[in-house]
């Protein structure tokens, strides 16, 4: 029985800042941000948006009357959780009109959470082929105004429906993984923003990839020639390239050039959205399927990494007719129709949040799902229509 990704949905906030303008405001050479980091635009979430609302927006784009009642598992991978007890997935039950007979929970392990959810979903569907699983990656990457990590912020969500006989991606059930206690990135419970040792984190990321790639080749007797495309966790677009470059000179030049070309197609969306944390790898997948020369039966290698740290490499195959199940035109339209705001407006939004007793004026809402109020310290959500 084939199991894999049957539907893919993506959401990002409707406001963004231009990275060149951010560099100018920070008195930094724009090339350092646009070339050195590899970013062009950065999504800016509104005050009424959080991991819950973005998860709902992305999931709403893959759920319909035919598949909604077949969902038996709901997992949200996030490191931007809004509650220390209640899972993001619990808020989604009524927002998305999901059936009650489901397991719904949240996974946290930095940017690896959604991959853990996807692997759990695979096992669930394999054991319950009449059911589907909804896996969502939803995050707001925050480092703070005028911090070194500011240029690698972002926001958005990716939703995946996992089922038997998938229409987009068949998972091979081949993977290798590793975990290690590493202090490369963390966000204590008292902090709204993350702390990172940037250079060290890059080193660990590359080390995890090279170690896992050797293990994957040995375990399954494969080489780079067996894969048409390699996809990476991309908190900023140059990071995945650091891992891919380790193959230069180790594989035929024409194969390396092909992988680099495909990688460039996989980062087009991330370059214009920013860091999705748990969703970054899967936004890369969407970008490649929409912008690249993806073909039926192409073999993909996917590298997932979460600081702290957990890494995994797994493989998958593109399903014939996949393009009929990804609304490419809608995604491109959504990205092109966003509103550019000034750096000053971004800083103002960044510094505000709803407090206990506050409500959101409906006139300020430009999305379907929103945080309507915080009442008695409880977050309450609504739909605009």
Image (cartoon, rainbow, N blue to C red):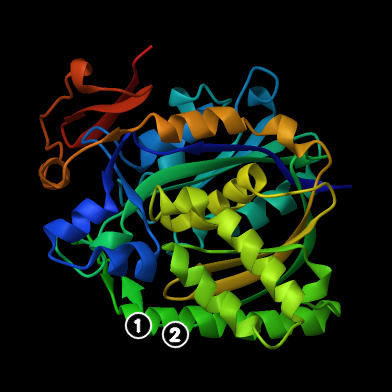
Asked whether, in this view, residue 236 is left or right of residue 8, the answer is: left
- Going by the picture, which residue comes out furthest to the top? 385
Q: Residues within 10 Å of mark 2 (few under 14, many from 20)?
A: few
Q: Residues within 10 Å of mark 1 (few under 14, many from 20)?
A: few
Look at the numbered disc 1 and give the secondary structure of its residue: helix
The residue singled out by tag 2 in the image is 203
Work out which quarter of the rendered image holds the C terminus and state it.
top left
Q: Position of residue 289 (x, y in %)?
A: 66, 46
Q: How many marks?
A: 2
Q: CA distance from mark 2 to mark 1?
A: 6 Å
Look at the numbered disc 2 and give the secondary structure of its residue: helix
- Residue 52 circle label: none
Seen at 59% across and 54% down, the residue is 265
Seen at 75% across and 38% down, the residue is 322
Residue 147 seen anywhere in this rendered image of the structure? yes
Seen at 51% across and 77% down, the residue is 242
Identify whether 351 is placed above or below 248: above
Q: Nearer the viewer, residue 192 or 189?
A: 192
Circles 2 and 1, Cβ within 8 Å, touching? The answer is: yes
Identify whether 336 is placed above or below 82: above
Residue 107 seen anywhere in this rendered image of the structure? no
The residue singled out by tag 1 in the image is 199
Q: Position of residue 194 (x, y in %)?
A: 26, 65
Q: Nearer the viewer, residue 194 or 1?
A: 194
- Going by the picture, which residue comes out furthest to the right? 1
Residue 7 falls in image quadrant: top right
Residue 197 falls in image quadrant: bottom left
Seen at 49% across and 78% down, the residue is 205
Q: Position of residue 181 (x, y in %)?
A: 44, 83
């Amino acid at each position: 029985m084939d199991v894999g990704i049957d539907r893919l949905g993506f959401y990002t906030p409707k406001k963004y800042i231009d990275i060149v303008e951010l560099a100018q405001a920070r008195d930094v050479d724009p090339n350092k941000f646009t070339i050195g980091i590899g970013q062009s635009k950065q999504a800016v979430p509104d005050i009424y948006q959080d991991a819950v609302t973005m998860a709902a927006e992305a999931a709403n784009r893959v759920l319909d009357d035919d598949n909604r009642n077949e969902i038996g598992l709901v997992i949200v991978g996030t490191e931007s959780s809004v509650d220390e007890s209640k899972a993001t997935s619990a808020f989604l039950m009524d927002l998305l009109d999901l059936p009650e007979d489901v397991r719904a929970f949240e996974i946290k392990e930095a940017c690896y959470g959604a991959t853990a959810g996807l692997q759990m979903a695979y096992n669930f569907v394999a054991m319950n082929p009449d059911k589907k699983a909804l896996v969502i990656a939803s995050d707001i990457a925050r480092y703070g105004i005028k911090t070194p990590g500011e240029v690698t912020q972002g926001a958005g969500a990716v939703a995946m429906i996992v089922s038997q006989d998938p229409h987009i991606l068949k998972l091979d059930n081949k993977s290798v993984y590793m975990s290690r206690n590493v202090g490369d990135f963390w966000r204590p419970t008292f902090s709204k923003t993350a702390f990172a040792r940037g250079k060290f984190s890059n080193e660990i990321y590359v080390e995890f990839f090279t170690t896992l790639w050797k293990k994957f080749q040995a375990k399954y007797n494969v080489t780079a020639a067996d894969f048409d495309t390699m996809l990476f966790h991309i908190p900023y677009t140059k990071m995945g390239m650091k891992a891919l470059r380790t193959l230069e000179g180790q594989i035929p030049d024409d194969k390396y050039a092909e992988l680099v070309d495909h990688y460039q197609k996989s980062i087009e969306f991330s370059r214009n959205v920013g860091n999705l944390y748990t969703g970054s790898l899967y936004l890369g997948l969407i970008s490649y399927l929409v912008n690249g020369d993806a073909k039926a039966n192409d073999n993909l290698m996917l590298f997932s990494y979460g600081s702290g740290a957990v890494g995994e490499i797994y493989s998958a195959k593109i399903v014939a007719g996949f393009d009929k199940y990804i609304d490419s035109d809608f995604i491109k339209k959504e990205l092109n129709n966003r509103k550019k705001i000034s750096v000053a407006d971004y800083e103002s939004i960044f510094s505000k949040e709803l407090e206990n007793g506050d409500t959101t004026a409906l006139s300020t809402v430009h999305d379907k799902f929103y945080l309507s109020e915080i009442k008695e310290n409880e977050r309450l959500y609504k739909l605009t229509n």
